[in-house]
Image (cartoon, helix red, strand yellow):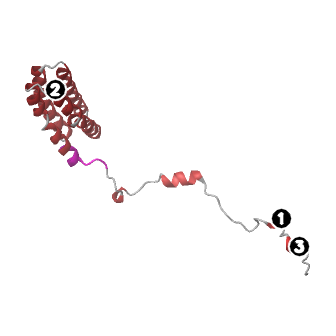
Amino acid sequence: AIALPPSLLLPSVANAGSSASIVLPNYIDYLIEKNTQTDESDMLYQGPDPETQLRRIGEAGTRIPEVATLAEEKKWSQVQGIITGPLGTLLQTMNSVASIAGTKEAKDAAKVVKADLFEISAAAGKKDSAGCVKAAGKAERDLEKFVKAAFK
C-alpha cells in the first residue's frame, strides 16, 4: 500500500475562500438606480385611455333609460342589477376620470351623478317607480354635464 503524506489527505482549511472575490450588491444603490427617471415612451402601460373611459361612460349611460323602463314595469331586481352592474362600473370610471381631469367642476359633477344613482337605488328599494323614473332622468342629464366638465 502506498502511504500519502498528511498534507495531501486534508487540504488546508486556512486557505479556503481566499480566492473568492464576490462583491455583494448595495441595496441603497439599487434603489437609487431603480428610481431614476425612466423613458415612459417604451412603457407598456401609458395610463388610462380617455377614449376607452369615454366609451365606458357612454355604454353605462345608455343603461340609465332602461332603469326607468324597468321601474315602470316594476321589475325591481333587474333595476338593482343595472345599478350594481353597469352603473357601479360607471361610478368607478367617473371617479377615475374626475381625478385625472383634476378640476373641481368634474369632481362635483361626479358627486351629483353618484347622488342621482343612490336616489335611483333608494327609490327601487321602496318600489317607487315614479321616484326611479324621476331620478333616472336627472341622472341622465347630470351625466351629460359630467362628460362636458371632464372632457373639455
Q: Which mark is residue 138?
A: none
Cα gap from disc 2 to disc 1, whole angstroms:
84 Å
Q: Quadrant of residue 25?
A: bottom right
Q: For this view, does 6 lie left or right of residue 97?
A: right
Secondary structure category for the residue under label 2: helix
Q: Looking at the image, which is closer to me, 144 or 119?
A: 119
Horizontal relation, residue 130 to residue 125: left or right = left
Q: Which range of residues does the magenta coloring cover? A: 47-54
The residue beneath circle 2 is 76
- Compared to 78, does 17 lie above or below? below
Q: Position of residue 5 (x, y in %)?
A: 91, 76
* Kind of residue at disc 2: Trp
Quadrant in the picture for the C terminus:
top left
Which of the two discs, 2 and 3, sits closer to the camera? 2
Q: Percent x, y for residue 94?
A: 24, 36
Identified at 83% across, 65% down, the residue is: 13
Report if residue 129 lies within the magenta region: no
Disc 1 packing (10 Å; few <14; some 14–19; many ≥20): few
Q: Nearer the viewer, residue 114 or 12?
A: 12
For label 3, the SS is helix
Q: Of discs 1 and 3, which sits in the foreground?
A: 3
Q: Which residue is mark 3?
A: 7
Disc number placed over residue 14 in the picture, else none:
1
